[in-house]
Amino acid sequence: MFLLNSIWRGIKGLAKLAFPFFAKARELRHPGQRLRWVLRLLVLAATLVLLGFVNEWADLERVLRAPLPILRKIWLPLLFLLIYVMSWLIWWLWELLTAEKEGSEFPDIDEAWDAALRALEQASIDLTQSPLFLILGSPIGTEEALLNAAKLSFEVGRTPRGANAPLHVYANRDGIYLTCPGASLLGRQSALLAESPLTDGIPAAGPVPARSVAVDLPALAVATQGAASSPFEPGVLGRGPESSEEREKSPPDGRELSSQPRRRRASLIKDQLEVDLQTGRLQHLCRLIVRSRRPYCPINGILFLVPFSTTESADEADEIGAICQHDRAAVRDTLQVQCPVFAVICDLEMVPGFRTFIGRFPEEQREKVLGLDLPLVPVVDESGFARMINDSVRWIAQVLIPTLVYRLWRLEEPDRTNASEVLHENIQLNQVLTRLQVREDRVFRALARAFASESPDSTLFGGCYLAATGRDATHEQAFVVGIFRRLLENQNYVSWTAEALAEDADYRRWAMLGWSSIGVFVVMVASLGYFFWLG
Protein backbone atom coordinates (compact mmCIF):
# COMPACT_ATOMS: atom_id res chain seq x y z
CA MET A 1 0.00 0.00 0.00
CA PHE A 2 2.86 2.35 0.87
CA LEU A 3 4.47 1.61 -2.49
CA LEU A 4 1.25 2.41 -4.34
CA ASN A 5 0.82 5.67 -2.40
CA SER A 6 4.39 6.67 -3.18
CA ILE A 7 3.91 5.95 -6.87
CA TRP A 8 0.64 7.92 -6.90
CA ARG A 9 2.25 10.90 -5.15
CA GLY A 10 5.08 10.81 -7.67
CA ILE A 11 2.65 10.80 -10.60
CA LYS A 12 0.70 13.71 -9.09
CA GLY A 13 3.94 15.62 -8.54
CA LEU A 14 4.94 15.19 -12.19
CA ALA A 15 1.46 16.24 -13.33
CA LYS A 16 1.56 19.38 -11.20
CA LEU A 17 5.02 20.16 -12.50
CA ALA A 18 3.85 19.88 -16.10
CA PHE A 19 0.53 21.68 -15.44
CA PRO A 20 1.40 24.21 -12.69
CA PHE A 21 -1.90 26.07 -13.07
CA PHE A 22 -3.68 23.08 -11.50
CA ALA A 23 -1.35 23.00 -8.48
CA LYS A 24 -1.61 24.84 -5.18
CA ALA A 25 0.61 27.82 -4.49
CA ARG A 26 2.59 26.05 -1.75
CA GLU A 27 3.49 23.24 -4.15
CA LEU A 28 5.28 25.58 -6.55
CA ARG A 29 7.69 27.38 -4.27
CA HIS A 30 10.63 25.04 -4.44
CA PRO A 31 12.72 24.51 -6.46
CA GLY A 32 13.47 27.81 -8.19
CA GLN A 33 11.80 29.06 -11.33
CA ARG A 34 14.61 28.17 -13.76
CA LEU A 35 14.98 24.67 -12.37
CA ARG A 36 11.20 24.19 -12.54
CA TRP A 37 11.21 25.01 -16.25
CA VAL A 38 14.10 22.63 -16.89
CA LEU A 39 12.29 19.83 -15.05
CA ARG A 40 9.06 20.70 -16.83
CA LEU A 41 10.69 20.38 -20.26
CA LEU A 42 12.32 17.09 -19.26
CA VAL A 43 8.95 15.71 -18.11
CA LEU A 44 7.35 16.89 -21.35
CA ALA A 45 10.06 15.29 -23.47
CA ALA A 46 9.83 12.00 -21.56
CA THR A 47 6.03 12.01 -21.94
CA LEU A 48 6.27 12.57 -25.70
CA VAL A 49 8.80 9.74 -26.08
CA LEU A 50 6.59 7.42 -24.02
CA LEU A 51 3.54 8.29 -26.14
CA GLY A 52 5.62 7.63 -29.26
CA PHE A 53 6.29 4.10 -28.04
CA VAL A 54 2.58 3.66 -27.23
CA ASN A 55 1.71 4.89 -30.74
CA GLU A 56 4.10 2.30 -32.19
CA TRP A 57 2.96 -0.50 -29.87
CA ALA A 58 -0.76 0.09 -30.59
CA ASP A 59 -0.04 0.15 -34.34
CA LEU A 60 -2.12 3.30 -34.77
CA GLU A 61 -0.70 3.85 -38.27
CA ARG A 62 -3.10 1.21 -39.65
CA VAL A 63 -6.28 2.82 -38.28
CA LEU A 64 -5.39 6.48 -38.76
CA ARG A 65 -5.77 8.50 -41.91
CA ALA A 66 -3.52 11.49 -42.51
CA PRO A 67 -2.25 13.36 -45.57
CA LEU A 68 1.36 12.70 -44.49
CA PRO A 69 2.69 9.31 -43.31
CA ILE A 70 4.85 10.98 -40.65
CA LEU A 71 1.73 12.30 -38.93
CA ARG A 72 0.42 8.76 -38.42
CA LYS A 73 3.66 7.80 -36.68
CA ILE A 74 3.59 10.73 -34.24
CA TRP A 75 -0.17 11.13 -33.91
CA LEU A 76 -0.43 10.36 -30.17
CA PRO A 77 2.54 12.56 -29.10
CA LEU A 78 1.27 15.33 -31.39
CA LEU A 79 -2.22 15.14 -29.87
CA PHE A 80 -0.80 15.43 -26.35
CA LEU A 81 1.41 18.35 -27.39
CA LEU A 82 -1.57 20.18 -28.86
CA ILE A 83 -3.58 19.62 -25.66
CA TYR A 84 -0.62 20.80 -23.58
CA VAL A 85 -0.18 23.98 -25.61
CA MET A 86 -3.91 24.66 -25.54
CA SER A 87 -3.92 24.29 -21.75
CA TRP A 88 -1.22 26.93 -21.43
CA LEU A 89 -3.07 29.23 -23.83
CA ILE A 90 -6.34 28.85 -21.91
CA TRP A 91 -4.55 29.58 -18.63
CA TRP A 92 -2.85 32.64 -20.14
CA LEU A 93 -6.20 33.89 -21.46
CA TRP A 94 -7.79 33.35 -18.06
CA GLU A 95 -5.03 35.36 -16.38
CA LEU A 96 -5.58 38.18 -18.85
CA LEU A 97 -9.33 38.22 -18.28
CA THR A 98 -9.14 38.06 -14.48
CA ALA A 99 -6.14 40.34 -14.00
CA GLU A 100 -6.84 43.65 -12.30
CA LYS A 101 -6.62 46.71 -14.47
CA GLU A 102 -3.30 48.46 -14.71
CA GLY A 103 -2.70 51.50 -12.59
CA SER A 104 -4.14 50.49 -9.22
CA GLU A 105 -6.05 53.14 -7.35
CA PHE A 106 -3.98 52.40 -4.24
CA PRO A 107 -0.43 51.50 -5.36
CA ASP A 108 0.95 51.88 -1.83
CA ILE A 109 -1.30 49.05 -0.62
CA ASP A 110 -0.26 46.87 -3.58
CA GLU A 111 3.44 47.46 -2.88
CA ALA A 112 3.07 46.73 0.83
CA TRP A 113 1.05 43.56 0.15
CA ASP A 114 3.59 42.33 -2.39
CA ALA A 115 6.38 42.93 0.13
CA ALA A 116 4.44 40.94 2.73
CA LEU A 117 3.90 38.06 0.29
CA ARG A 118 7.62 37.98 -0.53
CA ALA A 119 8.51 37.88 3.16
CA LEU A 120 6.07 35.02 3.76
CA GLU A 121 7.47 33.10 0.81
CA GLN A 122 11.04 33.57 2.01
CA ALA A 123 10.02 32.20 5.40
CA SER A 124 8.22 29.26 3.68
CA ILE A 125 4.92 30.24 5.29
CA ASP A 126 1.98 29.41 3.05
CA LEU A 127 -0.63 32.15 3.02
CA THR A 128 -3.32 29.64 2.08
CA GLN A 129 -2.49 27.12 4.80
CA SER A 130 -1.89 29.30 7.88
CA PRO A 131 -4.86 31.10 9.49
CA LEU A 132 -5.04 34.82 8.74
CA PHE A 133 -6.28 37.29 11.35
CA LEU A 134 -7.19 40.88 10.53
CA ILE A 135 -6.43 43.50 13.19
CA LEU A 136 -8.37 46.73 12.74
CA GLY A 137 -7.31 49.82 14.64
CA SER A 138 -4.16 50.49 16.58
CA PRO A 139 -3.17 51.36 20.14
CA ILE A 140 -2.11 54.91 20.87
CA GLY A 141 1.37 53.54 21.45
CA THR A 142 2.51 51.24 18.64
CA GLU A 143 1.05 48.15 17.04
CA GLU A 144 4.45 46.52 17.42
CA ALA A 145 4.11 46.84 21.20
CA LEU A 146 0.75 45.07 20.96
CA LEU A 147 2.22 42.16 19.00
CA ASN A 148 5.18 41.99 21.38
CA ALA A 149 2.77 41.84 24.31
CA ALA A 150 1.15 38.80 22.67
CA LYS A 151 4.44 36.92 23.20
CA LEU A 152 4.32 35.16 19.86
CA SER A 153 7.54 34.03 18.21
CA PHE A 154 7.30 35.55 14.76
CA GLU A 155 9.28 34.17 11.86
CA VAL A 156 8.20 37.19 9.84
CA GLY A 157 8.47 40.40 11.83
CA ARG A 158 6.88 43.73 10.99
CA THR A 159 6.70 43.75 7.17
CA PRO A 160 7.01 46.22 5.52
CA ARG A 161 9.21 47.94 8.08
CA GLY A 162 8.28 51.50 7.12
CA ALA A 163 6.22 53.42 9.66
CA ASN A 164 4.09 54.93 6.88
CA ALA A 165 3.22 51.57 5.28
CA PRO A 166 -0.56 51.11 5.03
CA LEU A 167 -0.34 47.55 6.33
CA HIS A 168 2.01 45.31 8.26
CA VAL A 169 2.25 41.54 8.52
CA TYR A 170 3.52 39.51 11.48
CA ALA A 171 3.57 35.76 10.96
CA ASN A 172 4.61 32.36 12.16
CA ARG A 173 3.40 28.93 11.13
CA ASP A 174 0.52 29.06 13.61
CA GLY A 175 -0.97 32.30 12.32
CA ILE A 176 -0.59 35.37 10.15
CA TYR A 177 -1.58 38.71 11.70
CA LEU A 178 -2.40 41.56 9.34
CA THR A 179 -2.68 45.12 10.64
CA CYS A 180 -3.89 47.93 8.41
CA PRO A 181 -3.27 51.29 10.12
CA GLY A 182 -3.39 53.09 6.78
CA ALA A 183 -6.25 51.20 5.17
CA SER A 184 -9.25 51.44 7.47
CA LEU A 185 -11.43 53.99 9.23
CA LEU A 186 -10.52 52.60 12.64
CA GLY A 187 -6.83 52.83 11.81
CA ARG A 188 -7.29 56.43 10.68
CA GLN A 189 -9.15 57.27 13.88
CA SER A 190 -6.32 55.77 15.95
CA ALA A 191 -3.80 57.88 14.04
CA LEU A 192 -5.83 61.02 14.75
CA LEU A 193 -5.97 60.11 18.43
CA ALA A 194 -2.20 59.64 18.52
CA GLU A 195 -1.75 63.13 17.07
CA SER A 196 -4.02 64.80 19.65
CA PRO A 197 -3.12 65.29 23.31
CA LEU A 198 -4.34 62.50 25.57
CA THR A 199 -6.67 63.82 28.25
CA ASP A 200 -9.62 62.70 30.22
CA GLY A 201 -12.66 64.72 31.01
CA ILE A 202 -13.30 62.93 34.30
CA PRO A 203 -12.63 65.06 37.38
CA ALA A 204 -9.79 63.65 39.42
CA ALA A 205 -11.23 64.48 42.81
CA GLY A 206 -14.04 62.68 44.54
CA PRO A 207 -15.11 59.07 44.45
CA VAL A 208 -17.70 57.71 42.07
CA PRO A 209 -21.10 57.47 43.76
CA ALA A 210 -22.26 53.94 44.30
CA ARG A 211 -24.74 52.74 41.70
CA SER A 212 -27.12 49.86 41.83
CA VAL A 213 -25.97 46.89 39.81
CA ALA A 214 -28.78 45.46 37.69
CA VAL A 215 -26.88 42.66 36.01
CA ASP A 216 -29.14 39.84 34.91
CA LEU A 217 -26.71 37.16 36.06
CA PRO A 218 -28.97 34.11 35.45
CA ALA A 219 -29.73 35.25 31.90
CA LEU A 220 -26.07 36.02 31.33
CA ALA A 221 -25.09 32.60 32.63
CA VAL A 222 -27.49 30.91 30.20
CA ALA A 223 -26.35 33.00 27.24
CA THR A 224 -22.69 32.44 28.04
CA GLN A 225 -22.91 28.78 28.90
CA GLY A 226 -19.54 27.17 28.34
CA ALA A 227 -17.67 30.48 28.39
CA ALA A 228 -15.18 31.44 31.05
CA SER A 229 -16.68 33.80 33.62
CA SER A 230 -13.50 35.03 35.26
CA PRO A 231 -9.91 34.48 34.25
CA PHE A 232 -8.67 34.79 37.82
CA GLU A 233 -9.00 32.20 40.53
CA PRO A 234 -9.01 32.93 44.26
CA GLY A 235 -5.62 32.79 45.85
CA VAL A 236 -3.50 33.60 42.81
CA LEU A 237 -3.46 37.37 43.30
CA GLY A 238 -1.55 39.30 45.87
CA ARG A 239 1.80 39.65 44.17
CA GLY A 240 3.84 41.82 46.45
CA PRO A 241 3.78 45.55 45.78
CA GLU A 242 6.70 47.08 43.98
CA SER A 243 9.43 48.29 46.23
CA SER A 244 10.45 51.91 46.18
CA GLU A 245 13.58 50.93 44.23
CA GLU A 246 11.47 49.18 41.54
CA ARG A 247 9.17 52.17 41.26
CA GLU A 248 12.14 54.46 40.80
CA LYS A 249 13.46 52.23 37.99
CA SER A 250 10.13 52.13 36.19
CA PRO A 251 9.46 54.89 33.66
CA PRO A 252 7.14 57.69 34.75
CA ASP A 253 3.49 57.69 33.79
CA GLY A 254 4.00 60.41 31.22
CA ARG A 255 1.29 59.07 28.96
CA GLU A 256 -1.43 58.78 31.58
CA LEU A 257 -4.74 60.41 30.91
CA SER A 258 -5.01 63.91 32.27
CA SER A 259 -7.90 65.12 34.42
CA GLN A 260 -8.36 68.25 32.33
CA PRO A 261 -11.08 68.26 29.66
CA ARG A 262 -9.91 68.51 26.07
CA ARG A 263 -11.26 70.12 23.00
CA ARG A 264 -13.67 67.98 20.99
CA ARG A 265 -12.10 66.49 17.87
CA ALA A 266 -13.67 66.89 14.46
CA SER A 267 -15.86 63.91 13.68
CA LEU A 268 -14.21 61.50 11.26
CA ILE A 269 -17.44 59.67 10.45
CA LYS A 270 -18.99 62.92 9.23
CA ASP A 271 -16.17 63.54 6.75
CA GLN A 272 -17.72 61.68 3.81
CA LEU A 273 -14.66 62.08 1.57
CA GLU A 274 -12.40 60.51 4.19
CA VAL A 275 -14.94 57.77 4.89
CA ASP A 276 -15.14 56.89 1.19
CA LEU A 277 -11.35 56.95 0.86
CA GLN A 278 -10.63 54.70 3.84
CA THR A 279 -13.49 52.35 2.94
CA GLY A 280 -12.14 52.02 -0.59
CA ARG A 281 -8.66 51.30 0.75
CA LEU A 282 -9.95 48.63 3.11
CA GLN A 283 -12.03 46.99 0.38
CA HIS A 284 -9.02 47.02 -1.96
CA LEU A 285 -6.93 45.27 0.69
CA CYS A 286 -9.69 42.71 1.20
CA ARG A 287 -9.76 41.98 -2.54
CA LEU A 288 -6.00 41.36 -2.44
CA ILE A 289 -6.53 38.92 0.43
CA VAL A 290 -9.27 37.09 -1.48
CA ARG A 291 -7.10 36.83 -4.59
CA SER A 292 -4.08 35.52 -2.65
CA ARG A 293 -5.98 32.97 -0.53
CA ARG A 294 -8.44 31.70 -3.15
CA PRO A 295 -10.12 29.19 -2.99
CA TYR A 296 -9.87 29.08 0.81
CA CYS A 297 -11.64 31.38 3.27
CA PRO A 298 -10.01 34.84 3.23
CA ILE A 299 -9.63 35.32 7.00
CA ASN A 300 -10.14 33.37 10.22
CA GLY A 301 -10.89 36.14 12.69
CA ILE A 302 -11.03 39.90 13.27
CA LEU A 303 -9.69 41.84 16.24
CA PHE A 304 -11.04 45.36 16.79
CA LEU A 305 -8.81 47.65 18.84
CA VAL A 306 -10.86 50.39 20.50
CA PRO A 307 -8.70 53.03 22.26
CA PHE A 308 -9.89 53.76 25.79
CA SER A 309 -9.79 57.51 25.11
CA THR A 310 -12.60 57.15 22.54
CA THR A 311 -15.06 56.52 25.38
CA GLU A 312 -14.52 59.94 26.96
CA SER A 313 -18.00 61.10 25.98
CA ALA A 314 -21.19 59.55 24.67
CA ASP A 315 -20.73 61.26 21.30
CA GLU A 316 -17.23 59.85 20.90
CA ALA A 317 -18.42 56.40 21.96
CA ASP A 318 -21.16 56.55 19.33
CA GLU A 319 -18.63 57.65 16.73
CA ILE A 320 -16.12 54.89 17.44
CA GLY A 321 -18.98 52.38 17.39
CA ALA A 322 -20.13 53.67 14.01
CA ILE A 323 -16.56 53.47 12.70
CA CYS A 324 -16.23 49.84 13.82
CA GLN A 325 -19.60 49.04 12.29
CA HIS A 326 -18.58 50.68 8.99
CA ASP A 327 -15.27 48.80 8.81
CA ARG A 328 -16.94 45.51 9.74
CA ALA A 329 -19.54 45.95 6.99
CA ALA A 330 -16.84 46.77 4.42
CA VAL A 331 -14.85 43.66 5.37
CA ARG A 332 -17.90 41.40 5.41
CA ASP A 333 -19.27 42.62 2.07
CA THR A 334 -15.90 42.24 0.32
CA LEU A 335 -14.64 39.01 1.87
CA GLN A 336 -18.12 37.45 2.03
CA VAL A 337 -17.19 35.39 5.06
CA GLN A 338 -18.45 35.16 8.63
CA CYS A 339 -15.71 34.73 11.21
CA PRO A 340 -15.19 35.28 14.96
CA VAL A 341 -14.95 38.93 16.01
CA PHE A 342 -13.38 40.21 19.22
CA ALA A 343 -13.20 43.70 20.71
CA VAL A 344 -10.33 44.99 22.84
CA ILE A 345 -10.46 48.21 24.84
CA CYS A 346 -6.75 49.02 24.60
CA ASP A 347 -4.39 51.65 26.09
CA LEU A 348 -5.49 50.83 29.65
CA GLU A 349 -1.94 51.60 30.80
CA MET A 350 -2.87 55.28 30.37
CA VAL A 351 -5.57 55.08 33.03
CA PRO A 352 -4.21 56.62 36.25
CA GLY A 353 -3.31 53.82 38.63
CA PHE A 354 -3.40 51.02 36.08
CA ARG A 355 0.37 50.56 36.26
CA THR A 356 -0.02 49.90 39.97
CA PHE A 357 -2.87 47.53 39.12
CA ILE A 358 -0.66 45.65 36.65
CA GLY A 359 2.28 45.54 39.04
CA ARG A 360 0.33 43.49 41.56
CA PHE A 361 -0.34 40.63 39.15
CA PRO A 362 1.95 37.61 38.80
CA GLU A 363 3.34 37.11 35.31
CA GLU A 364 1.17 34.07 34.57
CA GLN A 365 -1.97 36.01 35.49
CA ARG A 366 -1.08 38.81 33.06
CA GLU A 367 -1.31 36.26 30.26
CA LYS A 368 -5.01 35.66 30.88
CA VAL A 369 -7.86 37.77 29.54
CA LEU A 370 -9.33 40.64 31.53
CA GLY A 371 -12.90 40.47 30.33
CA LEU A 372 -15.62 37.99 29.49
CA ASP A 373 -15.74 35.30 26.82
CA LEU A 374 -19.05 35.19 24.98
CA PRO A 375 -20.49 32.32 22.90
CA LEU A 376 -20.11 32.96 19.19
CA VAL A 377 -23.73 32.00 18.51
CA PRO A 378 -25.73 32.82 21.66
CA VAL A 379 -29.25 31.54 22.15
CA VAL A 380 -30.80 35.03 22.05
CA ASP A 381 -32.58 37.26 19.56
CA GLU A 382 -31.29 40.66 18.41
CA SER A 383 -32.64 42.55 21.42
CA GLY A 384 -31.32 39.85 23.73
CA PHE A 385 -27.94 40.11 22.05
CA ALA A 386 -27.70 43.81 22.94
CA ARG A 387 -28.73 43.02 26.52
CA MET A 388 -26.09 40.30 26.67
CA ILE A 389 -23.38 42.77 25.62
CA ASN A 390 -24.71 45.26 28.18
CA ASP A 391 -24.67 42.66 30.95
CA SER A 392 -21.17 41.51 30.03
CA VAL A 393 -19.78 45.07 30.10
CA ARG A 394 -21.56 45.74 33.40
CA TRP A 395 -20.23 42.49 34.85
CA ILE A 396 -16.69 43.55 33.98
CA ALA A 397 -17.11 47.03 35.48
CA GLN A 398 -19.26 46.17 38.51
CA VAL A 399 -18.11 42.66 39.44
CA LEU A 400 -14.76 41.68 37.92
CA ILE A 401 -12.80 44.92 38.35
CA PRO A 402 -14.10 45.68 41.89
CA THR A 403 -13.34 42.12 42.98
CA LEU A 404 -9.79 42.38 41.72
CA VAL A 405 -9.23 45.87 43.14
CA TYR A 406 -10.58 44.95 46.58
CA ARG A 407 -8.33 41.91 46.72
CA LEU A 408 -5.36 44.04 45.77
CA TRP A 409 -5.95 46.67 48.43
CA ARG A 410 -3.49 46.67 51.34
CA LEU A 411 -3.95 47.58 54.97
CA GLU A 412 -1.50 49.64 56.99
CA GLU A 413 0.64 47.67 59.36
CA PRO A 414 0.81 49.18 62.86
CA ASP A 415 4.44 48.31 63.43
CA ARG A 416 5.68 49.75 60.11
CA THR A 417 5.85 53.29 58.80
CA ASN A 418 4.37 52.48 55.41
CA ALA A 419 1.02 54.16 55.85
CA SER A 420 1.62 56.80 53.17
CA GLU A 421 2.90 54.22 50.68
CA VAL A 422 -0.06 51.91 51.25
CA LEU A 423 -2.49 54.82 51.03
CA HIS A 424 -0.94 55.98 47.76
CA GLU A 425 -1.24 52.51 46.22
CA ASN A 426 -4.83 52.10 47.37
CA ILE A 427 -5.71 55.48 45.87
CA GLN A 428 -4.14 54.39 42.59
CA LEU A 429 -6.18 51.19 42.59
CA ASN A 430 -9.34 53.09 43.45
CA GLN A 431 -8.69 55.40 40.49
CA VAL A 432 -8.68 52.38 38.19
CA LEU A 433 -12.04 51.31 39.58
CA THR A 434 -13.40 54.86 39.32
CA ARG A 435 -12.34 55.46 35.72
CA LEU A 436 -13.56 52.11 34.44
CA GLN A 437 -16.93 52.31 36.14
CA VAL A 438 -17.53 55.83 34.83
CA ARG A 439 -16.82 54.62 31.28
CA GLU A 440 -19.08 51.55 31.57
CA ASP A 441 -22.10 52.98 29.77
CA ARG A 442 -19.98 54.53 27.02
CA VAL A 443 -18.14 51.28 26.37
CA PHE A 444 -21.50 49.57 26.00
CA ARG A 445 -22.71 52.29 23.60
CA ALA A 446 -19.66 51.75 21.40
CA LEU A 447 -19.92 47.95 21.40
CA ALA A 448 -23.67 47.94 20.85
CA ARG A 449 -23.34 50.30 17.89
CA ALA A 450 -20.50 48.24 16.43
CA PHE A 451 -21.74 44.68 16.90
CA ALA A 452 -25.38 44.55 18.03
CA SER A 453 -26.85 46.09 14.88
CA GLU A 454 -27.18 42.68 13.18
CA SER A 455 -28.28 39.20 14.10
CA PRO A 456 -25.89 37.45 16.54
CA ASP A 457 -25.81 34.48 14.15
CA SER A 458 -24.02 36.61 11.55
CA THR A 459 -21.91 38.67 13.97
CA LEU A 460 -20.04 35.87 15.82
CA PHE A 461 -19.01 38.28 18.58
CA GLY A 462 -16.67 36.35 20.86
CA GLY A 463 -16.14 38.81 23.70
CA CYS A 464 -14.86 42.14 24.96
CA TYR A 465 -11.58 42.50 26.81
CA LEU A 466 -9.44 45.12 28.51
CA ALA A 467 -5.73 45.25 27.76
CA ALA A 468 -2.66 47.32 28.51
CA THR A 469 -0.77 47.76 25.25
CA GLY A 470 2.05 50.19 26.05
CA ARG A 471 5.69 50.04 25.04
CA ASP A 472 7.14 49.03 28.42
CA ALA A 473 6.80 45.26 28.66
CA THR A 474 7.18 45.26 32.46
CA HIS A 475 4.83 48.06 33.49
CA GLU A 476 2.57 48.77 30.50
CA GLN A 477 1.68 45.39 28.96
CA ALA A 478 -0.84 42.95 30.37
CA PHE A 479 -3.84 40.76 29.44
CA VAL A 480 -2.90 40.48 25.75
CA VAL A 481 -1.60 36.91 25.47
CA GLY A 482 -4.99 35.40 26.28
CA ILE A 483 -6.70 37.49 23.61
CA PHE A 484 -4.49 36.14 20.84
CA ARG A 485 -4.95 32.68 22.28
CA ARG A 486 -8.71 33.16 21.83
CA LEU A 487 -8.13 34.11 18.19
CA LEU A 488 -6.22 30.91 17.54
CA GLU A 489 -8.71 28.73 19.42
CA ASN A 490 -11.63 30.01 17.32
CA GLN A 491 -9.93 30.05 13.91
CA ASN A 492 -12.09 27.27 12.45
CA TYR A 493 -15.48 28.85 13.16
CA VAL A 494 -15.82 30.45 9.74
CA SER A 495 -18.50 30.20 7.09
CA TRP A 496 -19.46 31.84 3.82
CA THR A 497 -22.15 34.49 3.88
CA ALA A 498 -25.52 33.94 2.23
CA GLU A 499 -24.46 36.31 -0.55
CA ALA A 500 -21.34 34.26 -1.21
CA LEU A 501 -23.30 31.00 -1.34
CA ALA A 502 -25.85 32.51 -3.74
CA GLU A 503 -23.07 33.82 -5.96
CA ASP A 504 -21.36 30.43 -5.92
CA ALA A 505 -24.62 28.71 -6.88
CA ASP A 506 -25.00 31.14 -9.77
CA TYR A 507 -21.44 30.40 -10.95
CA ARG A 508 -22.14 26.68 -10.75
CA ARG A 509 -25.25 27.03 -12.92
CA TRP A 510 -23.34 28.96 -15.55
CA ALA A 511 -20.44 26.49 -15.40
CA MET A 512 -22.84 23.57 -15.87
CA LEU A 513 -24.41 25.33 -18.82
CA GLY A 514 -20.99 26.02 -20.31
CA TRP A 515 -19.76 22.45 -19.90
CA SER A 516 -23.00 21.12 -21.36
CA SER A 517 -22.57 23.36 -24.39
CA ILE A 518 -18.98 22.20 -24.83
CA GLY A 519 -20.08 18.57 -24.52
CA VAL A 520 -22.75 19.00 -27.20
CA PHE A 521 -20.24 20.75 -29.46
CA VAL A 522 -17.65 17.97 -29.01
CA VAL A 523 -20.25 15.28 -29.78
CA MET A 524 -21.30 17.13 -32.93
CA VAL A 525 -17.71 17.55 -34.12
CA ALA A 526 -16.90 13.91 -33.36
CA SER A 527 -20.01 12.75 -35.23
CA LEU A 528 -19.16 14.85 -38.27
CA GLY A 529 -15.60 13.58 -38.21
CA TYR A 530 -16.78 10.00 -37.97
CA PHE A 531 -19.16 10.38 -40.93
CA PHE A 532 -16.46 12.03 -43.02
CA TRP A 533 -14.06 9.23 -42.12
CA LEU A 534 -16.59 6.60 -43.22
CA GLY A 535 -17.26 8.39 -46.46
Image (tube, grey):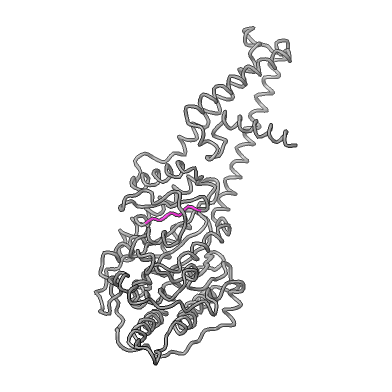
The furthest residue to the top: 69
Name the image quarter holding residue 1.
top right
Query: Closer to the camera, 230 or 22?
Result: 230
In the displayed structure image, the side of residue 274 where residue 58 appears, left or right: right
The furthest residue to the right: 1
Q: Main secondary structure of the magenta part?
A: strand
The furthest residue to the bottom: 414
Q: Residue at x 50, y 63 (%)?
A: 341
In the displayed structure image, the side of residue 403 where residue 23 appears, left or right: right
Depicted 427 relative to depicted 460: above or below? below
User: Residue 452, how many percent across, how many down?
Assistant: 49, 71
Query: Closer to the camera, 80 or 65?
Result: 80
Which span of residues is magenta-colored? Answer: 175-180
Depicted 374 relative to depicted 428: above or below? above
User: Residue 76, how many percent across, how many down?
Assistant: 65, 18
The furthest residue to the front: 415
Query: Closer to the camera, 9 or 391?
Result: 9
Depicted 293 relative to depicted 476: above or below? above
Depicted 495 relative to depicted 392: above or below? above
Q: Residue at x 52, y 84 (%)?
A: 215
* Residue 166 lies in the magenta stretch: no
User: Residue 285, how many percent across, how many down?
Assistant: 41, 51
Query: Closer to the camera, 521 or 413?
Result: 413
Q: Residue at x 49, y 73 (%)?
A: 371
Number of marks in the image? 0
Q: Quadrant of the C terminus?
A: top right
User: Residue 95, how many percent across, how many down?
Assistant: 47, 35
Name the image quarter holding residue 457.
bottom right
